[in-house]
Amino acid sequence: MRNCIIYGGTFDPIHNGHIQTAINVQNHFNFDRFIFLPCKTPLLKNNAIAITKQRIDMLELALAFQDNHKHFISDLSEINRDSPSYMVDSLQHFRQQFGANVAITLLMGIDTFNQLPKWHAWQQLLNLANLLVIKRAGFDETQLSDLVKELLVNYETFDDKAICKQAHGLIYSYDAGSFNISSSWIRQQFKAGKNLKGYLPDSVLQYIQQNSLYGTSQGV
């Protein structure tokens, strides 16, 4: 394997915004492996609503139907780790697993990128991986903090092939499509009794209804 990308998140639930972002990224960069990494305990967000097994079940259901994207896999190393879901620990795990020369890239939205200085040991991240920062609807890039702007000055590349070749230390910005949808919005809509067909994979929607998640009723 020459390169891989890691897409971390709570996935509570995984929705078509996640999936389509992943598809658009993979179609452009053609990573050898595309890893969905569900976290055990979201540290900068509210606690997950669905239990861990349910979030994993929904992720596996969503990926099972991506027949044209066999590179998509899930990794449960954060779920199985005893410590909190620190990304620096996950990147160290993957670096040890894959070796020093594999190009590892971490995928994140620009809103998350702007929160990077709040992450545990965030200064170590670019020693372990590249960052692929995707645009998010409604986020004004002038809102970026001075620390994050300094990161871009020091590490940003404008060569879209570089993150697939260099092991770590680069930041590349990419427009993977404007999907003004979030898991929190999905949960709010379920609670309000809205029909969310088309916003989630059908298998995930059926699972949510069967398990009465997010305020839904069985058989809705």
Image (spheres, rainbow, N blue to C red):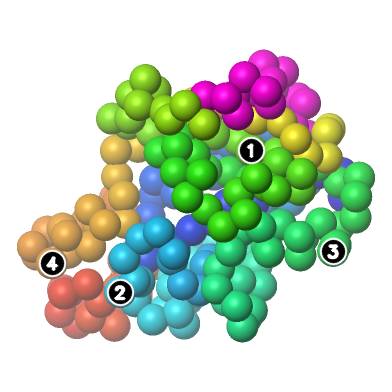
Q: Which residue is mark 2?
A: 49
Q: Residue at x 15, y 79 (%)?
A: 217
CB within 8 Å, label 4 to label 2: no
Mark nearer the N terminus (4 vs 2): 2
Residue 196 location in percent, x, y? Answer: 22, 56
Q: Which mark is residue 97?
A: 3
Residue 173 in the figure: left or right of residue 44: right
Residue nearest the observer in this picture, 97 or 117: 117
At a point 65% along the width and 67% down the height, the residue shown is 75
| 133 or 15: nearer the viewer | 133
Ranked by sequence position, the earlier of labels 1 and 4 is 1
Give the CA distance from mark 1 to mark 2.
28 Å
Q: Is residue 45 left or right of residue 114?
A: left
Crowdedness of circle 2 by 10 Å Cα count: few (<14), some, many (20+)? some
- Give the label on residue 143, or none: none
The answer to whether 43 appears left or right of 187 in the picture is right
Question: Mark 3 belongs to which amino acid?
Answer: Gln
Whole-percent x, y for residue 82 in the image: 61, 83
**Nearest to the observer: residue 22 or residue 68:** 22
In the image, residue 174 lies at what x, y percent? 55, 26
Q: Which residues are magenta?
A: 148-164
The residue under label 1 is 131
Disc 4: CA contacts within 10 A as few (<14), some (14-19) or many (>=20):
some
User: Residue tagged by mark 4?
Assistant: 191
Amino acid type, residue under disc 2 in the picture = Ile
* Callout 1: SS: strand
